[in-house]
Image (tube, rainbow, N blue to C red):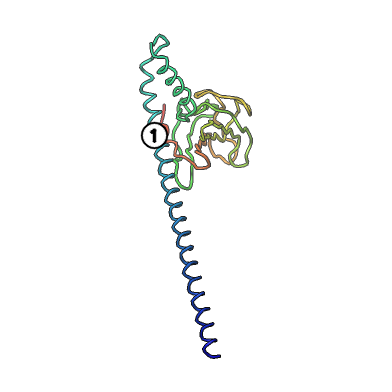
Amino acid sequence: MKKKIYYIFLILLLTTTIYCMVHNALLEKRLLAYHDKSEALADSLVLLRLENTSLKEDVETLKENQSLHITAQSDNPTLLSALSTMTNLARFIPDFVPLQSSYAVSKEFNSNHQSIDLSASKGTKIFSAGAGIVIACYEDKNLGNVILIDHLNSYKTLYAHLDQFRVSVNTFVEKGQEVGSVGNTGNSTNPHLHFQIYFGNDPVEPNSIMKIAKYKN
């Protein structure tokens, strides 16, 4: 009887050991799979950053090449079509400084102020940084009169403290088109433009896309 109990105990112990080994092997396999997925995700994020950098470089190259003024008389229609497509895409990149007359940078972009403030006289014309669709025109307690433009390429731009709107919701605007005027609405102590750029939901430093001088006369 004791020997029988011993064998039963031995079988249970062996079964438990085998179960634990199989379970550990499966767990290790799952951990390796999660690790591979994490590495793949990290690689994808790196590629996304590289593609975004490449896009900016392509736009800069396009700007330089635009001075060539290639005309419709070219004997390479494929090249013309490609250049036309790139030109159209470049229209939607928000790299046009929204104030073109006198202004001064009154507050730089930083982690606590993810926008740039441009002080200017009340009524100074404000221009769209890129082509896109006006998706919002509204009044905010802090930002005053606000315009939000979707550039249809993950970029959005926001213009705040406006005195007047020159566009309405759901209208298409071109790069460099007047959209409003500088004001002192909302929580503001002096006339200025509060300008923000977003890529997706992430704020973007404006000077990484356009060249905003500290002062312009």
Q: Is residue 159 left or right of residue 111?
A: right
Q: Nearer the viewer, residue 42 or 125?
A: 42
Q: Nearer the viewer, residue 92 or 99?
A: 92
Q: Tell me the residue at 36%/21% (across/down).
A: 65
Relative image position of residue 45 (x, y in whole percent): 43, 45
Mark 1 residue type: Ser
On-image quarter of the N terminus = bottom right
Q: Is residue 83 left or right of residue 142?
A: left
Q: Is residue 55 visible?
A: yes
Q: Tell me the residue at 39%/14% (across/down).
A: 76
Name the secondary structure under disc 1.
Answer: helix
| Number of other residues with Cα within 10 Å of mark 1, as a class: few under 14, some 14 to 19, many 20 or more | few
On-image quarter of the C terminus = top left
Q: Is residue 39 above or below residue 108?
A: below
Query: In this view, which residue lies farthest toward the bottom?
Result: 2
Residue at the spot of label 1: 54
Q: Nearer the viewer, residue 111 or 40?
A: 40
Relative image position of residue 32 (x, y in whole percent): 44, 57
Relative image position of residue 174 (x, y in whole percent): 53, 23
